[in-house]
Amino acid sequence: MPISEAEPNDPLSGDPAEKRTVRDTQSEFSELCLPNDTNMFGNMLGGHVMHLVDLCGAVAAMRHSRCPVVTASIDQMTFLHPVRLGELVKLRSQVNRVFRTSLEAGVKVWVENLHTREVKHTSSAYVTFVAVDASGNGIMLPPIEPETDEEKRRYEDAAERRAYRLAFRGRNGPTPKH
């Protein structure tokens, strides 16, 4: 995939020298589980949860990149607790690390019973996004600055996950261009 530099006057790109922090990328999203979102057992469809994870992660990615992004990969997702009809699904995302044209966003999902106020962690995922221009070419991204100890840990862990993903991709062939 060709890589382009953002145009200096491009309103989407912002100032590449501007400090960009993890905190600035954080995104939250909530949705009530309605009948159209459920399977025959009254639980939110797993594919719908994955869709919400992708959206919430993309918002964090776009807050950092200030341009369109496309999903390159999503790591394993495990569903620890169902989201039942009438419950609230809550998601929180942030950019963990930026590479050249891609970045990793971490997304965590909870379910809240609105009657009892009980909240349970239900899923987590790491999603890789690629910043693209109007022609679909990758755009070089500015670095991110982790500030807290937790953000620094996530930053280091993201490098290990990326190495694993690249090794896995190397064994299975190149990823097709989007």
Image (cartoon, helix red, strand yellow):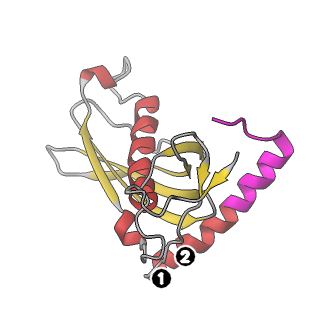
Return the residue nearer the eye: 60 or 125.
Answer: 60
Q: Which mark is residue 166?
A: none
Pointer 2 and pointer 1: residues touching (CB < 8 Å)?
Answer: yes
Query: Residue 172 lies in magenta, yes or no?
Result: yes
Query: For mark 1, what is the residue?
Result: 149
Q: In which quarter of the view is residue 37 placed? A: top left
Relative to 38, 113 lies left or right: left
Q: Which residues are magenta?
A: 162-178
Q: Quadrant of the image for the N terminus?
A: top right
Q: Position of residue 30 (x, y in %)?
A: 26, 45
Q: Position of residue 62 (x, y in %)?
A: 42, 54
Q: Position of residue 40 (x, y in %)?
A: 37, 17
Residue closest to the far right = 171
The answer to whether 170 is drawn above or below residue 175 in the figure is below
Q: Is residue 153 visible?
A: yes
Q: Quadrant of the image for the C terminus?
A: top right
Relative to 94, 42 lies left or right: left
Q: Is residue 122 visible?
A: no
Q: Residue at x 52, y 58 (%)?
A: 6
Q: Residue at x 45, y 42 (%)?
A: 54
10 Å neighbourhood of mark 2: few (<14), some, or many (≥20)? few
Q: Position of residue 79 (x, y in %)?
A: 48, 41
10 Å neighbourhood of mark 1: few (<14), some, or many (≥20)? few
Q: In which quarter of the view is residue 148 placed? A: bottom left
Q: Amino acid at mark 1?
A: Asp
- In the structure shown, which secondary structural element does the residue marked by tag 1 occupy? helix
The answer to whether 41 is drawn above or below residue 101 in the figure is above
Query: Residue 153 lies in magenta, yes or no?
Result: no
Q: Which mark is residue 153?
A: 2
Residue closest to the far top = 40
Q: Amino acid at mark 2?
A: Arg
